[in-house]
Amino acid sequence: MPKVFGFVPVRCGSKSIPFKNGKNFCGKPLVYWVVKALHDAASVDRVVVATDCNELEALVNGFGLAKVEVYRRSEENARDHSSTESVMMEYLRQSQSEGQDVMILAQATSPLTGSEDIERALKLLRSGEKDSLLSVVRTKRFFWTEDGVAVNYNPAERPRRQDFSGQLMENGAFYINTVANILRDHNRLSGSIGVYEMLEYTAVEIDEESDWLVAEQLMRKHQTYQKPAHTIKLLMMDVDGVLTDAGMYYSEKGDELKKFNTHDGKGIELLRGKGVKTAIITSENTEIVARRARKLKIDHLHQGVQNKLEVAEEICRKESVGWHEVAYIGDDINDLDVLRKVGLPACPANALETVRQVPGILHLTRSGGSGAVRELVTYILETYQYG
């Protein structure tokens, strides 16, 4: 009997968003959502994640999803110029898949895909006379050529949106075809092609940072997703470049000054109201930071620290919290060890590139000293289970 399997190609490399597929999206790595949708579809027998990356392999194996397996794609088919078809062909040529088996190519950059979409699309393909199928959305936008010619409507008789049928647009979520067809035509689609129409909001594909922000808002508005079973019980923070703008200010008398953000202070107060402990760990040692910590009622203040990981471990022991229950926000290389350890790593928009590439790190849109901590607090309260 023909089998159905999902195929999700993901790479470590990404030009627009570093380590995109492993980056934290609504509390989980981006790749998790499509893999989970395929896994939960009853008609799907197994899910193959094709990657070139140790970090992504570890993340996928950590999902604990029984149907999911990792395939290590070749370096040749994991380059910037490599096509999706090339890795599909590589896998099919070495796999034990039969010609009539059905492959669902699903894109990690479309996290709004649901298991119900997968099931309905498979049912549609099986009930018709189509050889392959792709997902689309209906758009009611008016299109023009560069020469000023209307493509899909008559400008002299401009229709109202409610009277306009619109056009179907490929949304990149998934493509379904048989193994035999793919091997024959070297293409994800072939023969007589059918379409499965998804809801309009699923048109978003994550290619740029702005797409990421839009997709997270759409996920929270439209999709029912399970919040992490645990909560964040401890927030740890660096100071310079996180709670401040990383600037060094001096008065005429030589006094050092720092600029803090009141919105961050309110965020820390909101966390405290949910019972979340807070800590500051910094390599600097100033009275300014001590005063700010007292004002914010920070539970643990450690200044002049050379090894932040050792201090973070000690705080976790004192508070009896696991690493998965800890959030840390940092911006420089001396934060890396802690960022790689905690359950929710985060960095301000102005963090060093090395920091931004930490697997699963949450890239905030605000810079240090400009509300980055408040943005992280908002994310924690919206994503995890409180109240």
Image (tube, grey):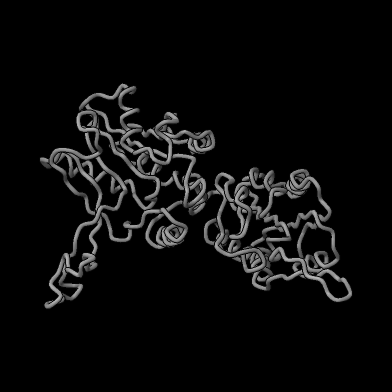
In this view of the protein, can residue 10 be seen by the observer? yes
**In the foreground, 58 or 296:** 58
Q: Nearer the viewer, residue 19 or 144?
A: 144
Q: Can residue 71 be seen in this view?
A: no
The relative height of residue 249 versus residue 126 in the rendered view (above or below) is: below
Q: What x and y, as percent, mark residue 129?
A: 10, 40
Compared with 299, 7 (above or below) is above
State the quadrant of the C terminus. Answer: bottom right
Q: Classify the position of the N terminus by image quarter.
A: top left
* Residue at image coords 69%, 66%: 245
Residue found at the far right of this picture: 253
Q: In this view, does 76 lie above or below 223?
A: above
Residue at image location 20% in from the left, 32% down from the top = 185
Depth check, front residue: 253 or 373:
253
Asked whether, in this view, residue 377 is left or right of residue 92, the answer is right
Q: Dividing the picture into quarters, in which one does residue 271 lie?
A: bottom right
Taking the spot 12% from the left edge, 78% from the top edge, the residue there is 156
Relative height, residue 366 to residue 159 (above, below): above
Q: Is residue 22 left or right of residue 125?
A: right
- Residue located at (89% from left, 75% from top): 253
